[in-house]
Amino acid sequence: MNPETPIASATNRLLPEKDCYDTDSQVATLNVITDHQRSYQLAYAHFLYSELGANPALEQNPDAPPQQLAIHFSMAVVTVLGAALHPIDKAVQKNDLKYLQRGSLDAAKLERRPAGSATVVASVVINFTEDKQ
């Protein structure tokens, strides 16, 4: 099985936007559910920083999600593509983000949106850093 190919059928279902993420001020870990439906718990004790900006893929593909959020932990980087990602960035910086997963596959929802628009998460990928020893 090719791990780069998204899982098809029922696991590729559309999720309501409100189900892309949730917050809870009492959590100690972030549950990251990747596009391949694998779940990872990342401890906030290992959170380093996050970066929110324009998606570099927009230069070559105008239909790409407009924003990219990179959440850096000591052992991994979580890359989120979507639109109106500011609430997720704010929640992760406050250690309040409970879980994060892809919430919509509808490309029409990923058009540039006015400020205050609903958050859309199009992709969640995790890359683990290699041990340099």
Image (cartoon, rainbow, N blue to C red):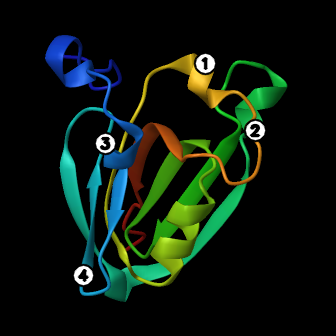
Q: In the rendered image, which quarter is residue 87 located in?
A: bottom right
Residue for badge 2:
56
For the residue labelled by badge 4, is the local secondary structure a helix, a strand or a loop? loop
Whole-Å distance between the Cαs marked 1 and 2?
19 Å
For the residue labelled by badge 3, is the local secondary structure a helix, a strand or a loop? loop
Whole-Å distance between the Cαs marked 1 and 3?
21 Å
Say if mark 1 contacts mark 4, CB within 8 Å: no
Give the quadrant of the N terminus.
Answer: top left
Q: Is residue 113 above or below residue 89?
A: above
Dot 4, crowdedness within 10 Å: few (<14), some or many (≥20)? some
Say if mark 3 contacts mark 2, CB within 8 Å: no
| Total numbered labels | 4
Q: Is residue 65 above or below residue 114?
A: above
Q: Residue at x 50, y 68 (%)?
A: 72
Q: Residue at x 56, y 46 (%)?
A: 118
Direction top: furthest residue = 9
Relative horizontal placement of residue 111, taking residue 30 as reference (left or right): right
Dot 3, crowdedness within 10 Å: few (<14), some or many (≥20)? many
| Residue 102 image point, x, y percent | 37, 38
Whole-Å distance between the Cαs marked 3 and 2?
20 Å
Identity of the amino acid at label 3? Thr
Dot 1, crowdedness within 10 Å: few (<14), some or many (≥20)? few
| Residue 9 image point, x, y percent | 19, 11
For the residue labelled by badge 2, is the local secondary structure a helix, a strand or a loop? helix
Q: Earlier in the sequence, mark 3 or mark 2?
A: 3
Residue for badge 3:
34
Q: Earlier in the sequence, mark 4 or mark 2?
A: 4
Residue for badge 1:
108
Identity of the amino acid at label 2? Pro
